[in-house]
Image (tube, rainbow, N blue to C red):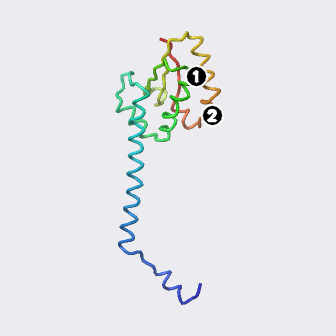
């Protein structure tokens, strides 16, 4: 670079139009992300029930505080239904244990299968998918089965 151009480059100040454009772009990205999360929350309601006494809003607030869970929560029904069949119900439950200083979510698979068959299928789910999930996720999201 020629020394003639150096003062021009080093003294560059973005115009207010450029800064305004950049701020609009950043806001647009933020808005798209928020819409995606809201869409994800709406999709969760299609797969899960919220019957544990905690309101749906509390569950969604927990997910909002831990957004890295959202993709796994959206992916889980596909894996669960492929192994357990379509005759199961999925509950999403917030679990708070203040003595153990734990707060997390449980995906509860409610099935008409026998306890032995349910546990065998849960083991299969572990081997085929769940054990590959990141530890940050599996530390606050658990899957259990509840024969009905």
Q: Position of residue 19 (x, y in %)?
A: 38, 69
- Is residue 69 rendered to the left or right of residue 126? left
Query: Which residue sits at x=35%, y=67%?
Result: 20
Q: Is residue 62 above or below residue 117?
A: below
Q: Is residue 114 above or below residue 29?
A: above
Image-quadrant location for residue 59: top left
- Is residue 93 rendered to the left or right of residue 119? left
- Toward the bottom, the furthest residue is 4
Q: Position of residue 70 (x, y in %)?
A: 47, 38
The reply to whether dot 1 and dot 2 touch (C-beta < 8 Å) is no
- Is residue 42 rendered to the left or right of residue 145? left
**Label 1 vs label 2: CA separation?**
16 Å
Image-quadrant location for residue 12: bottom left
Q: Is residue 107 above or below residue 132?
A: above
Query: Which residue sits at x=62%, y=16%?
Result: 120
Q: Say which label, 1 or 2, has the lower sequence index.
A: 1
Disc number lying in front (1 or 2)? 1
Q: Quadrant of the N terminus?
A: bottom right
Mark 2 neighbour density, 10 Å: few (under 14) some (14–19) many (20 or more): few
Query: Which residue sits at x=58%, y=22%?
Result: 83
Between 88 and 69, the one nearer to me in the picture: 88
- Toward the right, the furthest residue is 127
Q: Position of residue 127 (x, y in %)?
A: 65, 26
Between 57 and 127, the one nearer to me in the picture: 127
Q: Disc number at residue 51?
A: none
Residue topped by disc 1: 83
Q: Which structural element holds mark 1?
A: helix
Q: Position of residue 60 (x, y in %)?
A: 39, 35
Query: Which residue sits at x=34%, y=28%?
Result: 55
Q: Which structural element holds mark 2?
A: helix
Mark 1 neighbour density, 10 Å: few (under 14) some (14–19) many (20 or more): some
Residue topped by disc 2: 132
């Amino acid at each position: 670079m020629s020394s003639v151009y150096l003062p021009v480059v080093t003294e560059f100040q973005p115009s207010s139009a450029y800064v305004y454009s950049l701020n609009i772009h950043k806001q647009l990205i933020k808005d798209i992300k928020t819409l995606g999360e809201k869409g994800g929350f709406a999709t969760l309601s299609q797969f899960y029930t919220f019957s544990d006494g905690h309101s749906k809003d509390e569950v969604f607030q927990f997910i909002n505080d831990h957004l890295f869970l959202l993709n796994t929560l959206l992916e889980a029904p596909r894996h669960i239904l492929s192994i357990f069949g379509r005759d199961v119900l999925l509950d999403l439950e917030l679990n708070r244990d203040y003595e153990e200083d734990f707060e997390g979510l449980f995906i509860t698979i409610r099935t008409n299968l026998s306890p032995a068959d349910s546990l065998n299928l849960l083991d299969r789910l572990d081997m085929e998918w769940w054990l590959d999930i990141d530890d940050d996720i599996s530390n606050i999201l658990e899957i259990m089965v509840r024969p009905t």
